[in-house]
Image (tube, grey):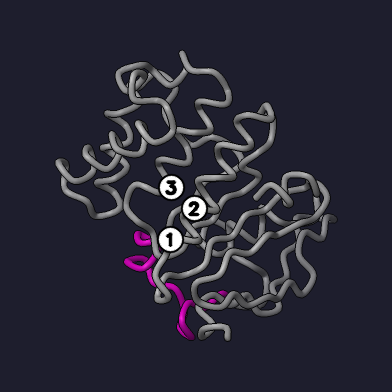
């Protein structure tokens, strides 16, 4: 039996000049579920994801969380891994994860401890003091995932997380996301993964 609906996208429309990015995009995600958002490049997946976080304002339609408009404070409890990396390339990995954890409401000790734990889980414990730009693409993606997870988000959104990764990195990230969904209590909220690859969708 599915839980109550947590996230709802209702009739989202968005146009960029002559390009129609969203044309009535609607879906609802029940509590405690993981959703794969599959579509070709240019289908509007990223635009829909950005609407969830208020990074893009739809021309029409609404995004609701537990039946209400999403407030700024609630967004701090969400985790987002964008398709384009949003971290600082010249900053040490652990330092910037600690900083971003603070933006999500964690104190410095809690943020640093959580970041270190997740880095160890993803095999990057020995690179915590490295600059992001010194890591491989796959390891940078792992750091992005840590950044989305370290504050134990109520909603986790991953936009094209497997793009450009080798098969081992795809398997590792897929396992972590699946484990998180399986280990979550019934009250946990959904995880959403967007991809243009059917193979990646099966992996996740």
* Residue 86 x %, y %: 49, 37
Q: Nearer the viewer, mark 2 or mark 3?
A: 2
Mark 2, other Cα within 10 Å: few <14 / some 14–19 / many ≥20: few
Residue 73 appears left or right of 143: left
* Mark earlier in primary sequence (2, 3): 3
Mark 1, other Cα within 10 Å: few <14 / some 14–19 / many ≥20: few
Q: Are marks 2 and 3 in contact (CB under 8 Å)?
A: no
Q: Residue at x 68, y 75 (%)?
A: 27
Q: Residue at x 79, y 70 (%)?
A: 23
Query: 77 or 23, which lies in front?
Result: 77
State the quadrant of the N terminus. Answer: bottom right
| Residue linked to disc 2 | 179
* Residue 183, disc: 1
Give the CA distance from mark 3 to mark 1.
17 Å
Q: Residue at x 48, y 86 (%)?
A: 67
* Mark earlier in primary sequence (3, 1): 3
* Residue 184 x %, y %: 42, 64
Residue 29 versus residue 143 in the image, above or below: below
| Residue linked to disc 3 | 148
Q: Nearer the viewer, mark 3 or mark 1?
A: 1
Residue range in magenta is 63-77
Q: Are marks 1 and 2 in contact (CB under 8 Å)?
A: yes
Give the CA distance from mark 1 to mark 2.
6 Å
Query: 164 or 59, which lies in front?
Result: 164
């Amino acid at each position: 039996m599915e839980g109550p609906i947590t996230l709802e996208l209702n009739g989202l429309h968005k146009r960029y000049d002559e390009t129609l990015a969203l044309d009535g995009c609607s879906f609802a995600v029940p509590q405690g579920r993981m959703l794969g958002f599959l579509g070709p490049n240019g289908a509007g997946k990223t635009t829909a994801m950005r609407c969830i976080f208020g990074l893009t304002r739809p021309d029409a339609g609404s995004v609701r969380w537990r039946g209400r408009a999403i407030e700024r404070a609630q967004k701090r409890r969400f985790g987002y891994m964008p398709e384009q990396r949003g971290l600082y390339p010249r900053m040490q990995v652990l330092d910037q994860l600690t900083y971003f954890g603070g933006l999500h409401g964690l104190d410095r000790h809690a943020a640093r401890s959580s970041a270190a734990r997740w880095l160890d889980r993803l095999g990057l414990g020995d690179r915590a003091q490295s600059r992001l730009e010194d890591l491989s693409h796959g390891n940078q993606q792992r750091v992005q995932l840590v950044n989305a997870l370290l504050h134990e988000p109520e909603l986790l959104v991953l936009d094209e997380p497997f793009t450009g990764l080798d098969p081992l990195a795809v398997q590792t990230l897929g396992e972590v996301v699946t484990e998180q969904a399986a280990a979550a209590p019934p009250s946990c909220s959904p995880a959403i993964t967007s991809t243009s690859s059917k193979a990646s969708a099966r992996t996740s």
